[in-house]
Amino acid sequence: MRADYGARAMIDLAQHAGMGLIQSASIANRQRIPESYLERLLAALRRAGLVRSVRGPSGGHELARTPAAITLGDIWDALEGVSGSGSCMDDEYACNVSPNCVLQDVWRELEESSRQILHGNTLEQLADRQARRRVQATYHI
């Protein structure tokens, strides 16, 4: 849930890039994320260097880098942690079931494919896709 909510908030910020600071209440309302939870996610994203925040009545949040320079993988890593699949993945001899388990290869391939997908999608691409879907969804004859 953290990565999903965080990604939605970051796409929202990408869609509003260059428009100044965006208040968390606005993001929470548009994305249907509880504001208190969103604040915690934004704090983690700020610590990761992905968001810049300003406190106060005219404060808010904005992307710390351009939407093209932030990937879904960056958000995932900031909110879920850099994937470490477990001891058997880290040490081929740690498997208690059988030495040189063939599943280790599959789990590694799965992890690598996931990382390629996550890091292959920028906020700019995702915001553009989101905008196209909104246009398609509101166009009726």
Image (cartoon, grey):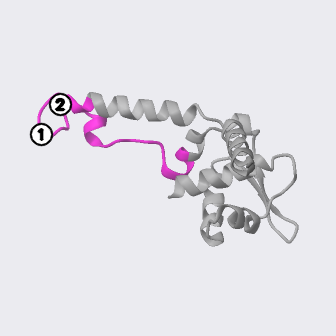
| Relative to 5, residue 81 above or below | above
Q: Which mark is residue 101?
A: 2
| Relative to 110, residue 140 above or below | below
At x 66%, y 61%, the residue is: 31
23 sits left or right of 89 in the view: right
Q: Which residues are magenta?
A: 76-104
To which residue does mark 1 refer? 97
19 sits left or right of 87 in the view: right
Q: Magenta span: helix, strand or loop, mainly?
A: loop
Find out whether the residues at labels 2 and 1 contact each other: C-beta distance under 8 Å: yes
Picture coordinates of residue 67 (x, y %)?
Answer: 73, 39
22 sits left or right of 91 in the view: right
Q: Secondary structure at mark 1?
A: loop
Residue furthest left in the image: 98
Q: Amino acid at mark 2?
A: Cys
Residue furthest front in the image: 141
Picture coordinates of residue 33 (x, y %)?
Answer: 62, 66
Q: Amino acid at mark 1?
A: Val
Q: Please state the total of marks drawn on the protein image.
A: 2
Q: Which mark is residue 48?
A: none
Q: Is residue 46 visible?
A: no
Dot 2 crowding, Cα within 10 Å, few <14, some 14–19, many 20+ = some
Dot 1 crowding, Cα within 10 Å, few <14, some 14–19, many 20+ = few
Determine which quarter of the picture holds residue 53.
bottom right
